[in-house]
Amino acid sequence: MMKLLSALYKLFYLFRGVGISKYVLIRPGVFLSLGIVKGIKGAINIGDNCELSNGVIIKAYGGKIELKKNVFLGEHVVLYGHGGIEIGENTMIAMHSCIISSNHTVPDRSELIRSKPDILMPVKIGADVWIGAGVKILGGVNIGNGCVVGAGAVVTKDLPQYATAVGVPARIINYRNE
């Protein structure tokens, strides 16, 4: 039954323009939206063997979101891809994590924040990365291959390969295999 339901979700999103490769599992309650911002249509590409768990939300907002092969997104993960998001092969992102690839321009108080354009800030996550539950990754961040980010961390700066980072803001506590 789950395979049939997943196949129906895949067909629905394929017809809406989402790029979905082979053996992708899309669980119930997933929401994928390309969005159009200033006439630019967004793109979502999902590689082979990816799994999108219940309640995952992926909104491109006119940007491009790419999941390489064998990526796992846990329950209620949210990706906002206005500035672009790339997630490398074999990466796991645990439940309730959020990735935001843009920020707001903050003008002086004589102008409304809402009246200003977003600042596009691409996010790139390498291969073989484990993002713990409830992690927030802010725009402009690059996370190197093999990193581990502890639950509840807020990543505001780049993390080099194989770093383990925890806390708010996230700080490196060690490196894998040290």
Image: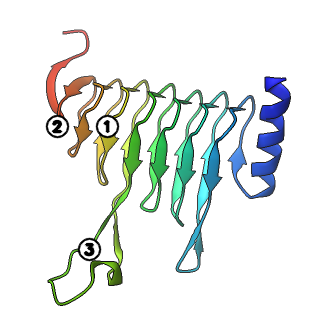
Residue 30, x across and y down, in percent: 64, 42
Q: Earlier in the sequence, mark 2 or mark 1?
A: 1
Which residue is the site of mark 2?
Answer: 168
Which residue is the site of mark 1?
Answer: 143
Q: Are marks 3 and 2 in contact (CB under 8 Å)?
A: no
Q: How far apart are the alpha carbons under marks 3 and 2?
A: 23 Å
Which residue is the site of mark 3?
Answer: 105
Question: Which image quadrant: the C terminus?
Answer: top left
Left or right of 28, for residue 12: right
Badge nearest the viewer, 2 or 1: 2
Left or right of 27, for residue 143: left
Q: Residue at coordinates 58% horizontally, 39% vertically from top-left?
A: 55
Crowding around mark 1 (Cα neighbors within 10 Å: few <14, some 14 to 19, many 20+) is many
The quarter holding residue 68 reads: top right
Q: Earlier in the sequence, mark 3 or mark 2?
A: 3
Left or right of 126, for residue 154: left
Q: Identify the amino acid type marked 1.
A: Ile
Tag 2, which secondary structure? Answer: loop
Q: Residue at coordinates 36% horizontally, 26% vertically from top-left?
A: 132
| Above or below for 9 versus 85 | above
